[in-house]
């Protein structure tokens, strides 16, 4: 019981000589797992995007960014000779 009380009071506890090495290995393993998880999800998202693109091509649908870019270009072109600000969409 005195060992536990000493730890609670802030006494220096016995250090495991390999504790730092083990902790570093654990951190490295966590980093490795995180990288593998990110790679897995990036691969899955790439597959989904290729399927989405196939659907867009099949039905002639444009991506949201393309629509926004075209709308912005149309607004700029329409307001080219105008003295007032363009209308809000």
Image: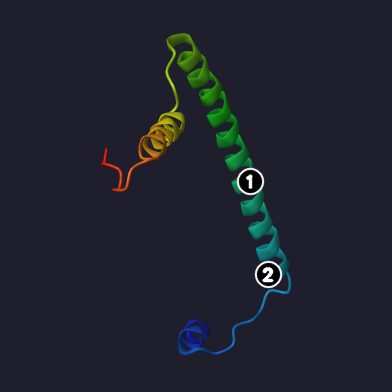
Question: In the picture shown, does residue 58 fall above or below 17?
Answer: above
Mark drawn on residue 19: 2
Q: Secondary structure at mark 1?
A: helix
For the residue pair 29 and 45, the one nearer the viewer reads as: 45
From the viewer's perspective, is the residue at label 2 or at label 1 nearer? 1
Q: Which residue is mark 1?
A: 35
User: Marks 2 and 1, how far apart in space?
Assistant: 24 Å
Image-quadrant location for residue 14: bottom right
For the residue pair 41 and 84, the one nearer the viewer reads as: 84
Residue 47 left/right relative to 16: left
Label 1, residues with CA under 10 Å away: few <14, some 14-19, many ≥20: few
In this rendering, the count of numbered labels is 2
Residue 71, position in %: x, y? 38, 33
Residue 27, position in %: x, y? 64, 59
Residue 66, position in %: x, y? 46, 30
Q: Secondary structure at mark 2?
A: helix
Residue 49, position in %: x, y? 52, 25
Question: In the picture shown, does residue 81 fall above or below 11?
Answer: above
For the residue pair 14 and 23, the one nearer the viewer reads as: 23
Label 2, residues with CA under 10 Å away: few <14, some 14-19, many ≥20: few
Residue 36 left/right relative to 58: right
Question: In the picture shown, does residue 31 fall above or below 53?
Answer: below
* Residue displayed at 69% across by 63% down: 24
**The C terminus lies in which quarter of the figure?**
top left
For the residue pair 56 and 9, the one nearer the viewer reads as: 56
**N-terminal label among 2 and 1:** 2
């Amino acid at each position: 019981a005195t060992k536990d009380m000493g730890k609670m009071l802030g006494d220096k506890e016995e250090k495991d000589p390999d504790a730092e090495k083990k902790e570093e290995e654990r951190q490295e393993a966590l980093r490795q797992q995180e990288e593998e998880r990110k790679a897995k999800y990036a691969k899955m998202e790439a597959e989904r995007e290729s399927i989405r693109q196939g659907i867009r091509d099949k039905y002639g649908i444009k991506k949201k960014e393309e629509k926004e870019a075209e709308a912005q270009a149309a607004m700029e072109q329409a307001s080219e000779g105008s003295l007032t600000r363009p209308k809000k969409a």
